[in-house]
Amino acid sequence: LEARLKLIEESGDIFDAPPNALLIHACNCQGSWGAGIAKAFKDSYGDAYHDYVDHCNENKAESLIGTALLIPPAATALKPSNNKSSPERKHFVGCLFTSRFYGKRKDSPTKILDVSGPAMEDLLSQVDAWNAKAKPDSRIGEVRMCKINSGLFAVPWPKTKAVLKSINVSKRDVTEIKVIS
């Protein structure tokens, strides 16, 4: 029997996650996290943002679309807080390339939906590869995402949700994702 990806919807703060959590959002292929949830990722994970920009600069949009970028925590340590006792949050950031452009030039909802499944499958493959070689204390644990595509890409969440829930996770490390809104 094939297992399908399970999505657990919760309310809360996507960034308030345990160490080694993977936080996923949908991205354009132009190297811009200028608005919406992407801007919150940029503000919280500046190093990850620079890795994402480099990745976009090194690859054409046509080769990025429908793929993903997994950025390990070494690059995503949050800016130190004023509270000296709070440990650095070590989170992985997962970028799903679901639209070539952003703003008025963003891809159509149909195009975005067509590449959302392949992008998530690519990310899950990268998680499997990471966990296979990582030490136990640096493996990816909890996986969280926002309601991807539903913000500035303007794709109704139930449509993206249906695509994601059809993904076969029988041979995957990740079988469920918390959708935080």
Image (spheres, grey):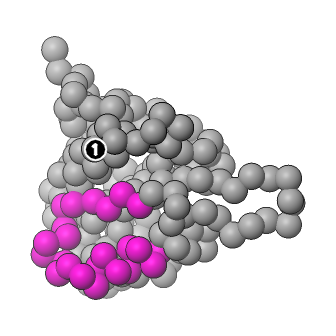
User: Quadrant of residue 155 in the image?
Assistant: bottom left
Question: Is residue 42 visible in this depiction of the protein?
Answer: no
The quadrant in which residue 131 appears is top left
Which residue sits at x=66%, y=49%?
Answer: 16
Circle 1: is it few (<14), some (14-19), or many (20+) Cα within 10 Å?
few
The vertical placement of 66 against 171, above or below, is below
Secondary structure beneath label 1: helix
Above or below residue 8? Residue 37 is: below
Identify the residue shown where x is 52% and y is 61%.
74
Where residue 32 sits in the image (x, y, percent)?
40, 81
Residue 123, position as x, y percentages in the image: 29, 51
Reply yes or no: does residue 167 show up in magenta.
no
Q: Is residue 181 left or right of residue 110?
A: right
Taking the image as shown, residue 128 lies to the left or right of residue 144, namely left
* Side (left or right) of 61 relative to 69: left
User: Which region shows up in magenta?
Assistant: 49-71
Residue 2 as seen in the image, left or right of residue 127: left
Magenta span: helix, strand or loop, mainly? helix
Q: Residue at x 37, y 50 (%)?
A: 157
* Tag 1: amino acid: Ala
Residue 46 location, x and y as percent?
55, 75
Q: Identify residue for label 1.
A: 129
The N terminus - image quarter: top left
Residue 17 seen in render: yes
In the rendered view, tell whether residue 142 sits above or below residue 101. above
Q: Nearer the viewer, residue 26 or 159?
A: 26
Residue at x 35% of width, y 80% of height: 54
